[in-house]
Amino acid sequence: MPRRNRIDPFGDLHAVPVRGMFTGNRGCLVGENGELVRHHRGNLWITCVTSYRDWKSPLDQPGHWTPLFFLDDAVALAAGHRPCGLCRRDDYLSYQRALTVGLGADQPISATEQNRRLAAERLRRGSGIDRAADRKMWFEDISALPDGTVVVEMGKPWLVHGDQILEFSFGGWLSPLPRPDGGQVGVLTPPTSVIALGHGFVPHIHDSIAHTG
């Protein structure tokens, strides 16, 4: 039975067999008995590679960060995570440079400031495991959104990719449809990460994208 540690673009936790390209964390999510008891803990939400320096991390150890799993960068960004500055140093620096340029800042946007911005922007959740009622989503014209953004159409998450949008599944991106020429859509990817995507950060997208043309 898979653990409930797979993350969808809304940032919610699921128990499904597939793990995806990346791991990451948002603090310790388990109680003293190792059972899942919370949706997140703290504002450090990062996305990591699944293997780094032969380090091993327990999946459900109390007092230790709880590994989560993401289909790809697009899902992780939509859920409110950013690249890890340690195991994904090049991707982190690329994200930081793109965000700095996009904001017109004189100095690189620090990890602390990135965390602060993302915490303020991502979908709100209560203190428990499941999504809370006080959801927060922002809206933008779909024609203005960069590739790698995840939007909501027909109540489901879709990836913006070139002239298409593709429906999320835990196994990959499916059911391509033509990207609308315009119109307001709900956006899951926080504005900070959309800025990074629009100014040079290139996300790692699941290879299912190659089979949808």
Image (tube, rainbow, N blue to C red):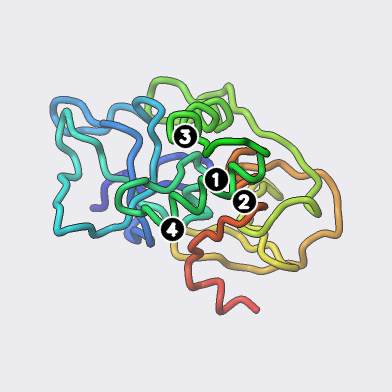
Q: Circles 3 and 1: CB distance less than 8 Å?
A: no
Structural crowding at the residue carrying mark 4, measured as other residues with C-alpha within 10 Å and reported as few (<14), some (14–19) or many (≥20) = many
Contact flag, marks 2 and 3 (Cβ < 8 Å): no
Q: Which disc number belongs to residue 71?
A: 4
* Residue that numbered label 3 is attached to: 110
- Can you tell which of label 4 and label 3 is closer to the viewer? 3
**The residue under label 1 is which amino acid type?**
Ala
Residue at x 38% of width, y 32% of height: 44
Q: Is residue 185 left or right of residue 17?
A: right
Could you tell me if the residues under marks 4 and 2 are in contact, i.e. CB atoms within 8 Å?
A: no
Q: Tell which circle, 2 or 1, labels the residue nearer the N-terminal end.
A: 1
Give the residue at mark 1. 78
Secondary structure found at label 4: loop
Residue 91's disc number: none
Q: Amino acid at mark 3?
A: Ser
Question: Looking at the image, do the residues carrying marks 2 and 1 touch, with CB atoms under 8 Å apart?
Answer: yes
- For marks 4 and 2, the one nearer the N-term is 4
Q: Residues within 10 Å of mark 3 (few under 14, many from 20)?
A: few
Q: Are marks 1 and 4 in contact (CB under 8 Å)?
A: no
The numbered mark, 4 or 3, whose residue comes first in the sequence reads 4
Residue pointed to by mark 2: 150
Q: Nearer the viewer, mark 3 or mark 1?
A: 3
Label 2: how many residues lie within 10 Å, few (<14), some (14-19) or many (20+)? many
**Figure quadrant of the C terminus:** bottom right
Whole-percent x, y for residue 62 in the image: 16, 30
Q: Which comes before the other along the chain, label 1 or label 4? A: 4
| Residue plotted at (51% across, 25% down) | 132
Q: Secondary structure at mark 3?
A: loop
For the point 56% across and 31% down, the residue is: 123
Q: Position of residue 140 (x, y in %)?
A: 77, 42
